[in-house]
C-alpha cells in the first residue's frame, strides 16, 4: 500500500486537533464582556452642551489677528492686502490658509512676511473701518386677501 492516498488525511489531523483547543483569550474576554448598567433603571441624561453661537457682527477693527478670510471678505481690507501683500488674496492655495491670521501665517511663510511688512500691514488695517451692511428694515406681513 502506498502512503500517497493517506497524505491528505495526515495533513488534516493537526487542523482537527487545533479546532478542539480551548477558545482564544479574545473569545473568552468577549464572553465576559458586560455593560455597567445601574440596577435601579435610574439612568441620568448627559449634561446639556452649551449652545453654539456664530458671530454675526463685523469686527470692531482689523488687525494681524483677524482671519485672512474675514480680511478678504471686506473690500477695504482686501485692498490693503492687495497693496501690501500682492497675490495673497488670489493665491491658488488660499483655501489652505484662509482660516489663519497673518500673525499665524508669518512663521509659515518662509521669511516672506517680514516684521516690517507685517507692521506696515497692521498700521494700514487699523485705519480701515470694517464694512457693516445696513440692516434691512423688517418686512411687514401682508394683510389678508
Image (cartoon, rainbow, N blue to C red):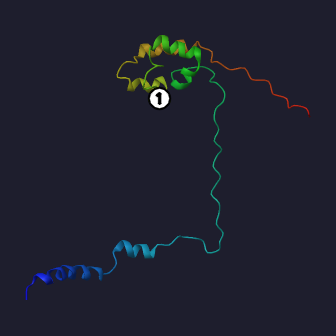
Q: Residue at x 32, y 81 (%)?
A: 22
Between residue 85 and residue 144, name the one nearer to us.
Answer: 144
Q: Residue at x 41, y 23 (%)?
A: 106
Q: In the drawing, does residue 14 fall left or right of residue 54?
A: left
Locate residue 137 relative to residue 105 in the image: left or right.
Answer: right
Name of the residue lying farthest toward the bottom:
1
Asked whether residue 65 appears in the rendered view, the answer is no
In the displayed image of the protein, which residue is found farthest to the right?
Answer: 144
The residue to which callout 1 is attached is 95
Quarter of the rendering containing residue 139: top right
Q: Say if residue 110 shows up in the picture.
A: yes
Quadrant position of residue 71: top right
Q: Is residue 74 above or below residue 52?
A: above
**Residue 136 in the image: x percent, y percent?**
76, 23
**Foreground: 56 or 123?**
56
Q: Where does the image place residue 30, in percent across and percent down from the top left?
A: 42, 73
**Front in this rendered view, residue 127 or 27:** 27
Q: Residues within 10 Å of mark 1 (few under 14, many from 20)?
A: few
Q: Quadrant of the N terminus?
A: bottom left
Q: State the image coordinates of residue 117 (x, y, percent, origin top left).
A: 43, 14
> Residue lying farthest left?
1
Q: Is residue 36 above or below residue 11?
A: above
Task: Give the residue drawn at x 60%, y 19%.
Answer: 61
Placement of the C terminus among the 4 image quadrants: top right
Does 79 sit above or below residue 6?
A: above
Amino acid at each position: 500500500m502506498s502512503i500517497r492516498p493517506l497524505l491528505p488525511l495526515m495533513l488534516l489531523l493537526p487542523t482537527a486537533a487545533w479546532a478542539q483547543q480551548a477558545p482564544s483569550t479574545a473569545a473568552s474576554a468577549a464572553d465576559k464582556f458586560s455593560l455597567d448598567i445601574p440596577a435601579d433603571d435610574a439612568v441620568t441624561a448627559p449634561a446639556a452642551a452649551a449652545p453654539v453661537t456664530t458671530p454675526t457682527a463685523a469686527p470692531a477693527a482689523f488687525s494681524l489677528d483677524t482671519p485672512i478670510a474675514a480680511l478678504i471678505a471686506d473690500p477695504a481690507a482686501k485692498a490693503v492686502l492687495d497693496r501690501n501683500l500682492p497675490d495673497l488674496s488670489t493665491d491658488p492655495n488660499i483655501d489652505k490658509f484662509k482660516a489663519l491670521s497673518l500673525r499665524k501665517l508669518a512663521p509659515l511663510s518662509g521669511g516672506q512676511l517680514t516684521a516690517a511688512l507685517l507692521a506696515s500691514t497692521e498700521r494700514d488695517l487699523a485705519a480701515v473701518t470694517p464694512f457693516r451692511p445696513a440692516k434691512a428694515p423688517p418686512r411687514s406681513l401682508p394683510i389678508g386677501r
